[in-house]
Image (cartoon, rainbow, N blue to C red):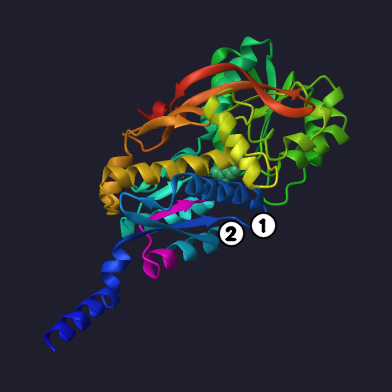
Amino acid sequence: MFKRRILIGAAALMLAPGVAFAQETVKIGLVLPMTGQQASTGKQIDAAVKLYVAQHGATVAGKKIEVILKDDTSVPDVTKRLAQELVVNDKVAVLAGFGITPSAMATAPIATQAKVPEIVMAAGTSSITEASPYVARTSFTLAQSSVPMAEWAFKNGIKKVVTLVSDYGPGIDAEKSFTEKFKADGGTIVENLRIPMRAPDFAPVLQKVADAKPDALFVFVPSGTGAQFVKQFVERGLDKSGVKLIATGDVTDDDQLNGMGDAVVGVINAHNYSANHNSALNKSFVEAFKKANGGLRPNFMAVGGYDGMYLIYEALKKTGGDANGDKLMAAIKGMAWESPRGPISIDPATRDIVQNIYIRKVQKVDGELYNVEFDTIANVKDPVKAAKK
Ligand code: PHB
């Protein structure tokens, strides 16, 4: 009788304490645009997160990792609702993803209120990290690539530039930071052109560029839109007009670059990641990513997702598996490691990424188009925040 009671008690212990069991799982709410205009970003990051988990296992510091993927359809109101549900219903310890700036911004108040870290793996507007003390970023800021692009342009004989950007957060950051640096160096900005972020029609602005005849056109459009821009640039004969195309690497995105055709060969651009980056780590990353995804080439969004997972895993190791938001944020600050893109770190003061920016030229390598890096600006902090100090 006594023995039986013990047995029943042990069985009850094993079955009943759902709470104790739940504590053993750390849930990550991954909110991405899997459909809609930014679907390529969602696909790239989801694939990178899955690869990271496959390579590093689903257990960290004794805790089981569960990634809950939600499709925000590239609509910020949906992002916000999903983030809220993930926090309240699923009790996620970390929110991650965020394909576009408005989605990252819409989630920041939830991160603050719930004290849940928001790991921004894609969006690039400078101010996102200032929207909540619980935001940390593994992607990039637009000024990080736009300022080196402006510097390279002026040094290399380009004196008159028209800028063309998507009319929202990252585009405005790209326009402002390029314009300020290029003017400070002695260059002339002929015109600042903006196009709508949703369903852009490049025809009217490209006519203006043709009329203005600058030495170069500087362009930012978000990942997934570059091929459409290039097509219209070529259709309007601008590739043969003597107007050089210079850009942030969002335009010559690895996800689409190979389909853009020979018109982009020779385009100079600045960015944080190229699938052609020459390091052992990147070579094995690209190979593993392609193998797991039917030959898909990883782009800079994939790397932001992969590094975001590294950040979450390593932060959990540092806290000994404690998923408390404040403890995770403390662990994240100042973390430094080697990414497929090169050395990176999280600035402890701003929670924003510090990384190398590479000047690249689109070239054919073994019959495929790649951004081939030829110059490196090391350890670039977000220039917008640096200027505020
Ligand atoms: C953004 O919305 O912040 C964003 C999206 C795609 C990019 C860059 C920035 O390529």
Q: Quadrant of ligand 1?
A: top right
Query: As displayed, is residue 283 above or below residue 183?
Result: below
- Could you say where residue 179 lies in the image, as x and y percent from the top left? 58, 25
Residue 294 is tagged as none
Kind of residue at disc 2: Val
Position of 369 compared to 197: left or right?
right
Kind of residue at disc 1: Gly
Q: For mark 1, give the secondary structure.
A: loop
Quarter of the figure with the C terminus: top left
Q: Image point 31% across, 49% down: which residue?
A: 61
- Disc 2: which residue: 75
Tell me if I can see residue 346 in this picture.
no
Q: For mark 2, give the secondary structure.
A: loop
- Could you say where residue 31 lies in the image, as x and y percent from the top left? 51, 57
- Disc 1: which residue: 36
Q: Nearer the viewer, residue 22 or 308?
A: 22
Q: Image point 51% across, 18% down: which residue?
A: 377
Label 1 and label 2: CA atoms lie apart by 8 Å
Q: Image point 68% across, 51% down: which residue?
A: 198
Q: Image point 63% across, 31% down: which residue?
A: 275
Position of 201 compared to 293: left or right?
right
> Would you say residue 215 sits in the magenta stretch?
no
Position of 295 compared to 338: left or right?
right
**Residue 207 figure quarter:** top right
Q: Which residues are magenta?
A: 84-100
Query: As displayed, is residue 57 above or below residue 188?
Result: below
**Residue 231 figure quarter:** top right
Query: As displayed, is residue 361 above or below residue 142?
Result: above
Tell me if I can see residue 349 in this picture.
yes
> Would you say residue 87 sits in the magenta stretch?
yes
Instruction: Report if the CB atoms under discs 1 and 2 are less than 8 Å apart.
Output: yes
